[in-house]
Amino acid sequence: MSKELSYLEAIREALAEEMRRDPKVFVLGEDVGPYGGAFGVTQGLHEEFGDLRVVDTPISESAIVGISIGASQRGYRPVAEMQFADFISCGFDQIVNQAATLRFRYGGRATVPIVVRAPSGGNVGGGLYHSQNPEAWFIHRPGLKVVAPSTAFDAKGLLKAAIRDDNPVVYFEHKYLYRRAKGPVPEGDEVVPIGVAATRREGSDVTLVAYGAMMTPSLEAADRLAKEGVEVEVIDLRTLLPFDKDAIFRSLDKTNRLLIVQEDVKTLGICAEISAVVMEEKVDTLDAPVMRVAYPDTHPPFSHILEGANLPNADTIAAALRKLAAY
Amino acid sequence: MPPIKRTKFKLSSDQLMEMFYWLKLIRAFDMRLSTLVKQGKVRSGVYTGIGQEAIIVGTGFGLRREDFICPLHRDLGAFLMKGVDARTMMSQMFAKTTGLSKGRDSALHSGVNELGIFGNTSMLGANLPVAAGLGYTFKMEKSDNVVIAYFGEGASNVGDFHEALNFAGVQQLPILFICENNQYAYSVPLEKTMAIDDVAIRAEGYGFDGVAINGNDVLAVYQATQGALARARGGDGPTLIECKTYRWHGHSEHDKAFYRTDEELAMWKSRDPIPTFTTYLRARHVLDDQKLKEIESKVEATIEDAVEFASSAPDPSPEDAVSDLYA
């Protein structure tokens, strides 16, 4: 029971367990076969499940998603890997026009149980095309679900839930966390339900909402504020579409102040949406304006100096928390 | 591998008459839709395949229920032949709840998994990766079912065409790629969109055979299909069959098609697949005046009934605009 896995191993274990449990689950993508994936996520799967269920594909992101959709229409549950979330733009049409709309235009007579895994995020020296956080493109598309785990536990539990879900799920796994996040994982049939946030730290003065790799600096900033006498409640969204509005509202009832943190660029990210929903439905609880800490509206640069200047960190988050607490 | 062109086939008089019925029904259905658009009874989204019916009948005749088809936007007849009744298809065009999409979309953007029909989006060629995924599941199951994937010569310029045919070639998938080359991508003639005469030669680049045939000869299409089907069912992989044809109407019913000459249209009308086949059947003493009359009355009654049914079917409720998004 005390088994601890890295975030990456947790993803691999979820894949292996679901493939053992359900012969309709298979994985496909670039280099996922004997090589084991660009990051090693699928290592060992080809050996255990063979060519047919661990499919090395050509460099064809659109086909990878389209093939998954086709297989799903015959009852399969494919897990498609985009080698980097940045490359998901090449499979964009199949996700947003084919998968997201299918049930709607079929009059509710079909489901699309596919998962698109997308290794996202910066702070790994990846430069423009190996660092992006394109989650907002997909939270803007009804018919999809979007998740972004921050812990090994959620990485495994959310992937299992995504595979069992009858809707197309885009699963953002953060590359920075692959080998840095470690912890216990769910065992057996336990999953982490889609659509439910987790409170990582209790507090009564400010609510901080974040997800993915932003959880670490967010929790560090909250610890700093505690030493200054400000108790920050930290919520890990875990699911971005549909996001857990109730968890945020419950916390706001205690704190009346909200900071939202995202690694995605600022304009029209999930922060903007959460802020708008709070303004529409919860403005009477607010004692201060909703604040955001996000990536500036620019591309992720290669130089660590430039990238460091862009990434939200414990300092910038703590500064925003102080401002909010003092408002 | 059996050759494509010289595959022997034998069709009984009843089968020939059934083919004739489908040609007549599909023609009449599209002609009626065209009139309904002019009368303002069908709003839009009508892309007729008038002139191209021999392709649908020749490729679709005798398919199994388990075989999957991935029609393009002119292939309403393929839905009928695969088992969707005329009332449902007419309801789809009338945006009624008795249609496949329950009013969410018109045209052929819906499918029926139980009948082996995939419904594509408006992104032409996007059905081809899906066809590859369907074919891949047949391969996994070592089944001898096949996928028939339809596309226009215009869609063969889309990236999805390349990704799908490449994957199908690598994996030796049981797929017939049927190109309905009707000479125009909306208004743009073939010579402006590709530097080759035959789409069929593109198959060579994917490691399988392509053949260009007269798409207005239902028996030629049937014959080529039977050869390709034998290969696909026997595990010998995909085939591309390019059917040269011509659409009599514009791209959609709203397109007056001023980009082509009357002479060109007249020339192609002289190659109308229906009189050609009628002459053949009469010469073979399969068809006589009496039987022709019976078929025409049956077709007329089916269309009348479908229009009557669809006209009086219930409209969707406003709530349906936001339902069936998630399973």
Image: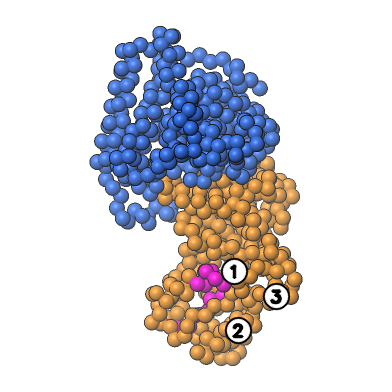
Q: Chain under label 3?
A: A
- Please check the rendered image and state whether residue A260 is part of the magenta-colored stretch, yes or no: yes
* Nearer-the-camera pick, A240 or B109: B109
Rendered blue, the chain in question is B
Amino acid type for the residue under numbered disc 1: Asp
* Nearer-the-camera pick, B201 or B142: B201
Residue plotted at (31% across, 17% down): B293
Q: Where is residue B190 in the image (x, y as percent from the top left)?
A: 57, 36
Q: How is the image coloured?
A: by chain
Q: Earlier in the sequence, mark 1 or mark 2?
A: 1
**Label 3, label 1: how many angstroms apart (C-alpha)?**
14 Å
Q: Chain under label 2?
A: A
Residues rendered magenta in the picture: A256-272
Q: Chain under label 1?
A: A
**Label 1, label 2: how many angstroms apart (C-alpha)?**
18 Å
Q: Mark 1 points at which residue?
A: A264
Evaluate whether residue B228 shows in this view.
yes
* Nearer-the-camera pick, A66 or A211: A66
Residue plotted at (47% across, 75% down): A275
- Write down the colour of chain A: orange
Q: Name the residue under label 2.
A: A318
SS class, disc 1: strand
Q: Where is residue A123 in the image (x, y as percent from the top left)?
A: 69, 70
